[in-house]
Image (tube, rainbow, N blue to C red):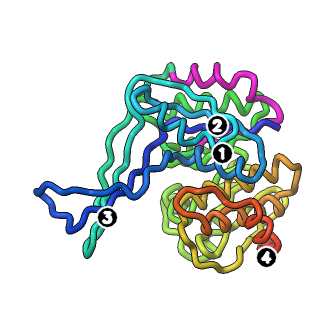
């Protein structure tokens, strides 16, 4: 089973420190970290770190794309780059002493609908029956949700399992696509349904509502409390062991990686949920966007508590 991750709008995440940062003044800063980012990139990293083969389709700009791809060569086993004119967007976070951080985001390359034809061509031999495609993160400037939705529906008709974790799609879009898996958090599911979802019972009922609309697996992230899954086998919860996280960046992306990795192995939905929790929890023990360690995943999965809710 082929796994293809799509990162159509990657970013450089740059963190720097400026001593006594002052607005309207010249400030000097030291770069703390510079990471090649993107939800699809994080999913591929997590899969590769755990020995799961996949193809990462990454759109890059010709001005800084070579450096971006070079930084991933030790993390991702199979990269399929698509190069466009322009720059990959950059998000700069300025840290200072005694004040809140300041974030500056630069726009990246602009695209048109022809990008999807390039994506189709690059993945022609990889997507079809017995394949999983993850569509995560935001759409790049110039690409409409309608055109992206049409491509995902086309792939689904060919037999691909579509995984979506993107705020670029509305609830009506998801109902039309009917993906194999979605992974909203509680805030996102409230936005989808247009009402506040606060209690756990409301989380269950809202997940059931989305499942009944044709989405095969609705996995709702509950933060440190784990996740809820509504699927054909029933309603399940999974809670990872308590931990003091080093970083939660990319944990949700790692949980998607864990779910699809278990699907590739032919496991049932409950085991897929457990694997998702193990990947996500293990990612919290690494710095920044570093992927979950394989040994840590195997250690945690033994201690993931599951419960049948219906």
Residue 51 counted in the magenta span: no
The answer to whether the residues at label 2 and label 3 have Cβ atoms under 8 Å apart is: no
Real-space Cα distance between discs 4 and 2? Answer: 30 Å
Real-space Cα distance between discs 3 and 4? Answer: 36 Å
The answer to whether the residues at label 2 and label 1 have Cβ atoms under 8 Å apart is: yes
In which quadrant will I find the N terminus? top right
Spot occupied by residue 139 in the image (x, y as percentages of width and height): 48, 38
- Mark 3 lies on a secondary structure that is strand
| Foreground of the two, 273 or 253 | 253
| Residue 300, image quadrant | bottom right
Residue 91 in sight here: yes
Give the residue pinned by disc 2: 56
Give the residue pinned by disc 4: 303
Spot occupied by residue 195 in the image (x, y as percentages of width and height): 49, 64
Look at the image and give the residue range highlighted in magenta: 115-135
The answer to whether the residues at label 3 and label 1 have Cβ atoms under 8 Å apart is: no
Real-space Cα distance between discs 2 and 3? Answer: 31 Å
Residue 119 counted in the magenta span: yes
For the point 48% across and 49% down, which residue is it?
35
Q: Which mark is residue 44?
A: 1
Compared with residue 245, is residue 41 higher up or lower down, i.e. above or below? above
| Foreground of the two, 58 or 221 | 58
Give the residue pinned by disc 3: 95
């Amino acid at each position: 089973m082929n796994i293809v991750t799509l990162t159509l709008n990657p970013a450089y995440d740059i963190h720097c420190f400026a001593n006594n940062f002052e607005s309207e003044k010249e400030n000097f800063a030291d770069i703390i970290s510079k990471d090649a980012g993107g939800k699809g990139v994080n999913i591929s990293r997590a899969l590769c770190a755990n020995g799961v083969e996949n193809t990462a389709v990454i759109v890059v700009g010709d001005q800084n794309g070579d450096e971006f791809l070079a930084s991933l060569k030790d993390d991702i086993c199979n990269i399929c780059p698509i190069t466009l004119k322009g720059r990959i967007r950059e998000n700069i976070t300025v840290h200072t002493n005694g004040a809140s951080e300041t974030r500056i985001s630069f726009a990246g390359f602009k695209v048109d609908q022809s990008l999807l034809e390039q994506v189709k061509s690059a993945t022609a031999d990889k997507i079809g029956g017995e394949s999983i495609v993850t569509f995560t993160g935001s759409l790049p400037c110039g690409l409409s949700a309608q055109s992206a939705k049409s491509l995902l529906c086309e792939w689904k008709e060919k037999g691909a399992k579509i995984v979506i974790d993107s705020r670029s799609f509305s609830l009506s879009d998801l109902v039309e696509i009917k993906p194999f898996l979605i992974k909203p958090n509680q805030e996102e599911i409230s936005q989808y349904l247009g009402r506040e979802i606060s209690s756990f019972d409301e989380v269950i009922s809202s997940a059931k509502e989305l499942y009944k609309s044709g989405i095969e697996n609705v996995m709702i992230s509950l933060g440190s409390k784990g996740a809820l899954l509504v699927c054909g086998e029933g309603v399940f919860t999974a809670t990872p062991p308590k931990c003091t996280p080093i970083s939660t960046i990319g944990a949700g992306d790692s949980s998607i990686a864990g779910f699809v990795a278990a699907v590739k192995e032919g496991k049932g939905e409950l085991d897929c949920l457990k694997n998702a929790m193990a990947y996500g929890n293990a990612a919290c023990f690494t710095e920044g966007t570093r992927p979950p360690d394989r040994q840590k995943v195997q250690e945690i999965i033994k201690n993931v508590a599951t419960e049948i809710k219906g």
